[in-house]
Amino acid sequence: MAAAATVALALAISGATASLTGTDNRAVKLANDLKPGYQPWAQPMGWVPSSDAERWLFAMQAGLGGGLIGFAVARQRKGKGQHS
Amino acid sequence: MHIAEGYLPLAHCALWGVCAAPFVMDSVRQLNQPEVRARRFELAAAGGLLLLLSALKLPSVAGSSSHPTGVALAAIWFGPRVVPALTLVVLLLQALLLAHGGITTLGANEFSLGVCGPWIAWLAHRASLRLGISPSWACWLGAFASSLAVYAVASGQLAVAYPDPSSGVVGAAWKFGVVFAWTQIPIAITESFLTSATFRLLSPQRNEAIS
């Protein structure tokens, strides 16, 4: 449940931020300003997702994280119940 | 923060890789320690927060957005030496599946996110506790310091590769730092509240362990 909630939240946030410029891209832009004509000597080596796929993958990564936190909280509560 | 694929000269990539590698190897050893394994559910939560935060692209001031770093909780709970292997997994995942960061810049990104961030988080947290700050605010300050530290180190790494024609490396570091700072300070504040909330969520057990 925590995982599903996190995926939904992450998708909502990524929808809201789609039009904003990420700092990673700003850094690339400044690097290009400081060295005009610089060509990156390597290209992304893995899979390059479309912007929609990127949103879903990031949301799934966040969901996995949220799920792990939920799992740990649930385990801890259960463990405490047994001890007391 | 991800320095994009191909944006650091080969020599820099190699150097940062050599700097980061021993920390990663040490981290794998740390993760296999019995005392870390015994707390695997907390490790799952700390790793979960890292995955969650590093995947969020949060809006910030002036039409910009950025990623939190998410390394503080693991560093505060387990010590900074445990963290590099966790961040390496995240960085590889994002380099290969999301075209964020890169394989050539993996060493540099790992050094800022996996080594510098966690150490600063741990030091800031320890210093805050010494000053008598409450555990959850000490956690907040650790997260805040580490989030900014990761971006400060990344600014330095970029500045060494892209010195300003007139003001040199220092001038370029300032320029990259300014680009990041406006976006990252509000993000660091958000990240710190999320980290401290997770810390409190799982803290009953921790308080026993600390005392």
Image (cartoon, rainbow, N blue to C red):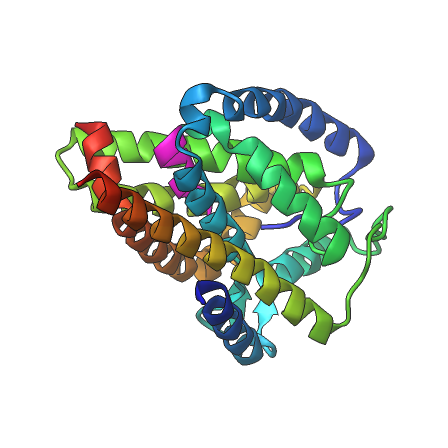
Residue at image x 36%, y 53%?
A74
Residue at image x 50%, y 42%?
B150
Residue B77 painted magenta = yes
Percent of width and height locating residue B155: 57, 44
In the picture shown, does residue B94 fall above or below B133?
Answer: below
Occupied quadrant, residue B39:
top left
Occupied quadrant, residue B188:
bottom left
Question: What span is in magenta?
Answer: B69-78
Percent of width and height locating residue B43: 44, 38
In the picture shown, does residue A27 fall above or below A56?
Answer: above
Residue placed furthest toward the front: A82
Residue at image x 35%, y 51%?
A73
Residue placed furthest toward the left: B132
The prevailing secondary structure element of the residues shown in magenta is helix
Percent of width and height locating residue B117: 47, 38
In the picture shown, does residue B110 fall above or below B95?
Answer: above
Residue A69 painted magenta = no
Side (left or right) of B92 relative to B23:
right
In the picture shown, does residue B37 fall above or below A71?
Answer: above
Percent of width and height locating residue B19: 64, 23
Quadrant of the frame with the C terminus of chain B: top left
Side (left or right) of A49 relative to B91:
right
Residue at image x 77%, y 42%?
B103
Q: Along the line of sight, which residue is nearer the eye, B140 or B208? A: B208
| Whether residue B156 is visible | no
| Whether residue B210 is visible | yes
Q: Along the line of sight, which residue is nearer the eye, B205 or B12? A: B205
Q: Along the line of sight, which residue is nearer the eye, B139 or A7? A: A7
Q: Along the line of sight, which residue is nearer the eye, A39 or B171? A: A39
